[in-house]
Image (tube, grey):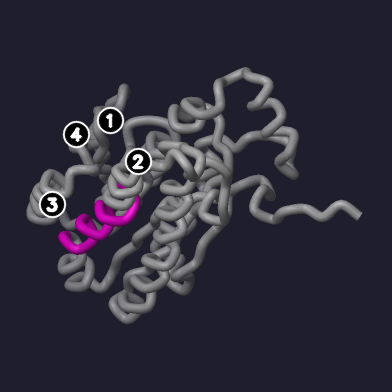
Amino acid sequence: MSVAIVTGGSGGIGSAICRAMIAEGYEVISVAHEAPDWEHERLRVVVVDLMDPDSTAQMAADLAARFEVSHLIHNAGVIRPDLLADVKLEDLQALTQLHLGAPLQILQAVLPGMKRRGFGRVVLLSSRAALGAETRTAYSATKAGMIGMARTWALELAANGITVNLVAPGPIGGTRMFHEVVPAGSERETRLAAGIPVKRLGRPGDVARAVMFFADAGAGFVTGQTLFVCGGASLGSLAV
């Protein structure tokens, strides 16, 4: 049975990914700062602060010792919005650990097993904001950094049967992270949805389906790629 670590699996997109993987027969380990509000016989739960490098390292070593991890889905994320003049260095450092350091630590721990078995799937959740977005200095910088990091890993690990890809969601409604910035049912939410080419916000299931494509054992000829799941919001527009 394939074993997948899903970070940030306690709600929103992470929960949708966990449910989708369980439906496909995976054993799933949710790694997040809190437990999911649902249970399944193939769902294991680890509560940890991924912004703490020491706790993350200990957790990763423990999981690598106990499970033959075949998949790493790094979904955990935080925004911490601020205009440039107000950006705090500690926020940049925290998001660097969460978005870049944590997946690095976890992959380093489970990588020997993936190499030994000659198979692995790594999917990092970046963001459309990696292309730039107001008030997103720390978030955009670290989500963009994920793309360079994943492409480097893809090159290094391709010969070992390990693929590394990214899913970059646009605005996804019904998630705590999104609605902490854009209140549900607000005029701002309505304007945002109207500005997306497909004229709606995304849903967690939209992202989960993209993750499942990259996670599939049959997707071995696709690596180092970024799939924007954003309703066309990454395309930009030109009024003529």
State how far apart marks 4 and 1 are (Cα).
16 Å
Residue at image mark 3: 57
Q: CA gap, disc 4 to disc 2?
A: 19 Å
Residue in the foreground of this view, choosing between 41 and 30? 30
Residue mark closest to the camera, 3 vs 4? 3
Q: Are marks 1 and 2 in contact (CB under 8 Å)?
A: yes
- Write down the residue under mark 4: 47
Q: Nearer the viewer, mark 4 or mark 1?
A: 4
**Residue 229 is a magenta residue:** no
User: Tag 4, which secondary structure?
Assistant: strand
Question: Mark 3 belongs to which amino acid?
Answer: Ala
Residue 67 at what x, y percent from top left? 14, 52
Mark 1 secondary-structure assignment:
loop
Query: Which residue carries the number 2 mark?
Result: 22
- Judged left or right of residue 58, residue 24 is right
The residue shown at (36%, 39%) is 18
Cβ–Cβ under 8 Å for marks 2 and 3: no
Q: Amino acid at mark 1?
A: His
Measure the alpha-carbon separation of dots 3 and 1.
26 Å
Helix, strand or loop at mark 2: helix
